[in-house]
Image (tube, rainbow, N blue to C red):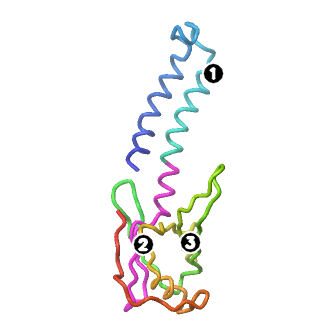
């Protein structure tokens, strides 16, 4: 997250510099490039840095850093990433629309197994993203969040620790 902020902060002055001086270097021809070319380079570089930072901000709002299940209040506490720290969101367990596991993606010429979950909640447009190896979604939680329904006839595991940080 900090790297994306640094990219945004550095892309603005570099974009302004390119818009003012592109073409003056001997390798570029030694003559100032036309205004449209300079503006295209300046705006393009600036948008790359700011766009990268905006995309990381959006990803941080979906990526779950910590997940707690409060069984007494029947609430789900979701902690998402921010540029500085985490943000806590509280939802009722009944708001869980679905949990889906994703794995085995074909990338280029290789199969990659990097399992992750999407957690969909009612009233939320984008799903939360949970990293499976990070341990944010225990098997017991998946059972309870599905309303006690077993998947493929598997019984739930005994109770486990109900909080685990992946940061």
x and y percentages locating residue 113 in the rendered image: 56, 62
Q: Is residue 161 above or below residue 165?
A: below
Task: Pick whichever, 65 or 105, lies toward us.
Answer: 105
Which residue: 60% across, 14% down? 33
Graded by Cα atoms within 10 Å as few (under 14), some (14 to 19) or many (20 or more), the crowding at tag 3 reads few
x and y percentages locating residue 78 in the rendered image: 42, 73
Residue underneath mark 2: 136
Magenta stretch, residue numbers: 54-79
For mark 1, give the secondary structure: helix
CA gap, disc 3 and disc 2: 20 Å
> Mark 1, mark 2: which one is toward the viewer?
2
Quarter of the view holding residue 140: bottom left
Which residue: 35% across, 62% down? 167
CA gap, disc 1 and disc 2: 48 Å
Graded by Cα atoms within 10 Å as few (under 14), some (14 to 19) or many (20 or more), the crowding at tag 1 reads some
Residue underneath mark 1: 37
Residue underneath mark 3: 124
Which residue: 40% across, 58% down? 82
x and y percentages locating residue 55 in the rendered image: 52, 51
Q: Is residue 65 magenta?
A: yes
Q: Is residue 97 left or right of residue 70?
A: right
């Amino acid at each position: 997250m900090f790297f994306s902020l640094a990219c945004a902060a550095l892309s603005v002055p570099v974009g302004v510099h390119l818009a003012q001086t592109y073409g003056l270097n001997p390798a570029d021809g030694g003559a100032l490039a036309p205004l449209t070319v300079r503006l295209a380079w300046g705006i393009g570089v600036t948008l790359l840095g700011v766009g990268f930072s905006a995309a990381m901000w959006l990803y941080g709002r979906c990526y779950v850093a910590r997940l707690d299940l409060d069984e007494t209040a029947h609430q789900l506490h979701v902690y998402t990433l921010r540029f500085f720290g985490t943000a806590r969101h509280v939802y009722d367990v009944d708001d869980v629309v679905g949990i889906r596991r994703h794995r085995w993606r074909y990338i280029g010429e290789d199969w990659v197994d990097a399992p992750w979950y999407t957690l969909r909640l009612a009233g939320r447009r984008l799903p939360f993203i949970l990293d499976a190896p990070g341990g944010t979604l225990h098997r017991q939680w998946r059972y309870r969040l599905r309303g006690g329904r077993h998947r493929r006839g598997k019984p739930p595991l005994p109770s486990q620790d109900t909080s685990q940080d992946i940061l």
